Amino acid sequence: MESLRTPTAPPAPVGGFGVVAPSSDDPDWWRNAVVYQIYVRSFADGDGDGTGDLAGVRSRLEYLRDLGVDAIWFTPWYASPLADGGYDVADYRAINPAFGTLSEAEALIREALELGIRTIIDVVPNHVSDHHPWFTAALAAGPGSAERERFWFRDGGGPHGDEMPTKWVSDFQGETWTRTQNPDGSPGQWYLHLFTPEQPDLNWTHPDVKQEFHDVLKFWFDRGVGGVRIDSAALLVKDETLPEVPERPGPGQHPTVDRDELHDIYRGWRAVADSYPGSRSLVGELWLPDIQRFAKYLRRDELHTAFNFDFMARPWDAIELRRSIDTTLAAHAPVRAPATWVLSNHDVTRPVTRYGRHDSSFAFPAKRFGIPTDLVLGTRRARAAALLAAALPGSLYVYQGDELGLPEAENIPLDRIQDPMHFRSNGIDPGRDGCRVPLPWRGSNSGFGFGPDGADKPWLPQPKDWRLLTVEQQESDPESMLRLYRDMLRLRRVIAPPGADAFHWLAAEDGVLAFSRGDRFVHLTNLSRHPVELPQHERVLLSSAPLIDGMLPADSSVWLRTLSRQAGDAAVA
Ligand code: GLC
């Protein structure tokens, strides 16, 4: 175990125990890590109140070790009123009491490291909760105060100040400005929130804001955290002149997205991360259509990686997926950053559901209730897609429940929905609760082992037929999604050892993606409508569906071990 202290620094106990070092010394661990995303509220409920918590996670760490993950990314676990599932943070240094305590988080980080699993926390720098002390102080201090300068308070337009300062549209639809009330009850200034009114945007030109987030990073790195997922990473900087959004903004010209000043902010964050030994990595949530602009964030002194949403959003189509893989790898190569492969997360439709639809691409504006879905087909494709994503060079993200093949829960009663995206669309968008339903662990009684026996009902209802998808059920079924994921992640260590970035497309018939990694491994995904021949091989390592007469059926993937030096030459008939 390497030390996180310089030789001269005295040992400083932090939060009741010594500073924690990552368990492995590999400085490049993040380049091909398998990262498992935990949505804390819905992973496992340790205390039986119907809400997932840190005790629940601690009791399931061996499950994650057996699955074969290198790191866990926790969606925000901080004190929060949960107006946006925790992405409204009231205190970045405290754990939400519904989830546990800081000392439990410290114990969890340590216990995970003992199993070889790093912890990645989610830092939300674009906005805070309206319950954050900075914001409540800003409201109380009134117009013109120093406290308001940490946010975007502005007078309204028009003779009575009742016109919003801009017409910017929220990422959650609707307005981005909310008017405040003066202490005497009269209408006051407006403040900016790119998401909900409960998430006021911070002013990143303010030195307090920059300093605070450096301190928050240090607070968690001191506790042994191995990485940070940066929420809404492209939105922090705004054009201070507050122009309207141009019809076709050129590079860096959008008033709130991907502004050039962001790069210096992340250089500062990287310097903080690099001041710790053991490679503390930064992964950005960057939804950017321009992949060249995206890659700029991955320069050597900025972020380590960023989510590849392009791949995730593409439909089940060989040309589309190949194009995404090519543009991704080509854009990452010059900055020498590894790609990430992401099939889903807590914001998007579960793959089993998405791939079972006529339009299998993903786009937020297209989300609707009642889209016809073939879950058998979707599951088959999701299995094939998992093997594809896991075989590509770079790091892999697995969202909790995808390893169980959970579909999107589409029948949540309207009065149980919590996601603000649903409400802000006037009920047109079903929202994101359908991918956030508590996991089924065991048994066939209500709750499916999400909490201990006799626990309260889970905070969102689970579909009844999830009794067939519990971990317990799937462990004993060699054909299950869980067993596929376990085999896949175990074999991935062999086919993609650290540093093995080699990747070559192989000739293949239309509708087939075929590539080699190194000289003994070949991957095939068949997106055509009929079975295809396999190239010469020594052994089938893994397939997402049974082969038919030695052929790979439609909507499936296979991993092959080839004879030495044969992989690069193999062609698929
Ligand atoms: C990110 C998160 C999402 C959240 C939003 C606002 O996109 O992934 O869940 O609602 O930021 O913080």
Image (tube, rainbow, N blue to C red):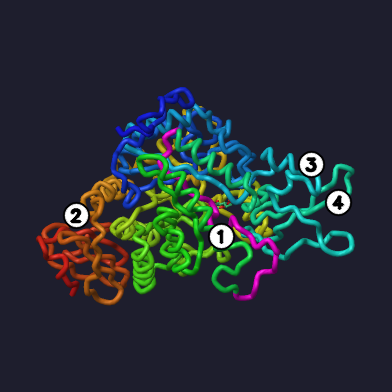
Asked if disc 3 and disc 4 are in contact, CB closer than 8 Å, the reply is no
**In the image: residue 217, left or right of residue 477:** right
Nearer the camera: disc 1 or disc 2: 1
- Amino acid type at circle 1 is Glu
The spot of residue 305 in percent (x, y) is 41, 55
Look at the picture and state if 113 lies above or below 403: above
**In the image: residue 48, left or right of residue 485:** right
Q: Earlier in the sequence, mark 3 or mark 1?
A: 3
Q: Which residue is mark 3?
A: 141
Nearer the camera: disc 4 or disc 2: 4
Quick one: label 4, few (<14), some, or many (20+) residues within 10 Å?
some
Q: Which residue is mark 4?
A: 187
Where does the magenta region start and end?
Answer: 223-248
- Amino acid type at circle 2 is Leu
Q: Earlier in the sequence, mark 3 or mark 4?
A: 3
Look at the picture and state if 78 lies above or below 287: above
Asked if disc 3 and disc 1 are in contact, CB closer than 8 Å, the reply is no
Look at the picture and state if 134 lies above or below 349: above
At mark 3, the secondary structure is helix
Q: Which residue is mark 1?
A: 261
Q: CA distance from mark 1 to mark 4?
A: 34 Å
Q: Is mark 3 within 8 Å of ligand 1?
A: no
Q: Nearer the viewer, residue 104 or 422?
A: 104
Give me the disc on residue 541: 2
- Residue 417 is at least partly visible in this image: no
The spot of residue 377 in percent (x, y) is 38, 62
